[in-house]
């Protein structure tokens, strides 16, 4: 399973965006190789990023996660972006999270059950098992279809609706994960750093 590392400037100024780049360089020294999967460049200054996300399939030692997860402080000794600015402490957030596991939709994972359809429709609908329930065994999701008088037609419809339901569930999982990732930008705590650096921006 892949592990992702996101470095974010939150909604900070250009100095924080520069620190994202500098902290990324420090991380690459201790966790090689990391694959760049996403980044949000600063909209005005080259070499600065509002966020950078790396991925790795290697196991990251718990000690590294513990030592880096949270807020990282960079104390600037030189600020080329605003030379006269009095502030020297700039904060970024570092977050580790796992790859989203989505169910693989295999035909062998779908079980079809037939049953009698209730309601109107004449003797054929009531006496013959034309209704079909499709169940996705790994997730337990199921749908029942009795729209058509033919069992084969209901099976086809049930499969289509089950796949749609699985897709909607997957989309929801992805959306929730992205929401958590983006919340990191707003939840950056400026203070109580887990790691400190010092140097020019």
Image (tube, rainbow, N blue to C red):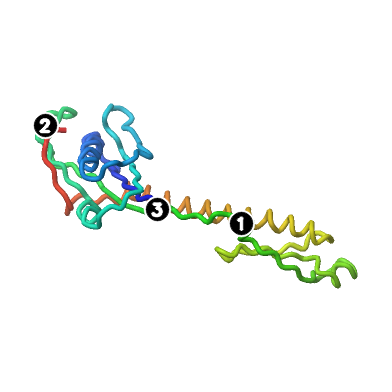
Q: Up-down: is 54 above or below 159?
A: above
Q: Residue at x 79, y 71 (%)?
A: 116
- Residue at the spot x=34%, y=46% of the render? 56
Q: Secondary structure at mark 3?
A: loop
N-term mark: 2 or 1? 2
Q: Position of residue 52 (x, y in %)?
A: 32, 40
Q: Is residue 25 left or right of residue 88?
A: right
Per the rendering, the mark at residue 1 is 3
Q: Is residue 53 left or right of residue 69?
A: right
Q: Nearer the viewer, residue 66 or 12?
A: 66
Which residue is at the front of the view, 83 or 201? 201
Secondary structure at badge 2 equals loop
Q: Dividing the picture into quarters, in which one does residue 138 lie?
A: bottom right
Query: What percent of the width, then of the height, locates residue 184?
Result: 33, 50
Vertical comparison of 81 with 120: above or below:
above
- Near mark 1 (Cα within 10 A), the count class, few <14, some 14-19 or many ≥20, is some
Q: Which mark is residue 20?
A: none
**Element assignment for label 1:** helix
The residue singled out by tag 1 in the image is 165
Q: Where does the image place residue 21, in percent across and percent down from the top left?
A: 24, 36
Q: Between marks 2 and 3, how big is the CA–CA gap?
A: 40 Å
In the image, residue 182 sits, relative to residue 110, either above or below, namely above
How far apart marks 2 and 1 lie (CA) works out to: 55 Å
The mark nearer the N terminus, 2 or 3, is: 3
Which residue corresponds to mark 2?
78
């Amino acid at each position: 399973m892949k592990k992702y590392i996101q470095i974010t400037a939150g909604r900070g100024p250009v100095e924080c965006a520069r620190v994202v780049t500098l902290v990324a360089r420090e991380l690459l020294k201790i966790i090689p190789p990391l694959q760049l999967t996403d980044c949000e460049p600063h909209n005005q200054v080259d070499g600065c990023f509002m966020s950078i996300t790396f991925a790795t399939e290697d196991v990251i030692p718990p000690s590294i996660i513990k030592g880096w997860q949270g807020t990282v402080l960079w104390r600037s000794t030189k600020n080329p972006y605003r030379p006269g600015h009095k502030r020297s402490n700039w904060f970024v957030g570092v977050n580790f999270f796992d790859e989203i596991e989505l169910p693989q939709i295999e035909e062998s994972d779908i079980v079809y059950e037939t049953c009698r359809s209730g309601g109107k429709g004449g003797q054929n609908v009531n006496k013959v098992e034309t209704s079909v329930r499709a169940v996705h065994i790994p997730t337990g999701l199921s749908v029942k279809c009795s729209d058509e008088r033919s069992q084969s037609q209901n099976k086809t419809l049930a499969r289509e609706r089950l796949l749609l339901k699985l897709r909607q569930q997957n989309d929801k999982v992805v959306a929730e994960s992205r929401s958590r990732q983006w919340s990191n930008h707003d939840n950056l705590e400026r203070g109580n750093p887990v790691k400190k650096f010092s140097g020019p921006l």
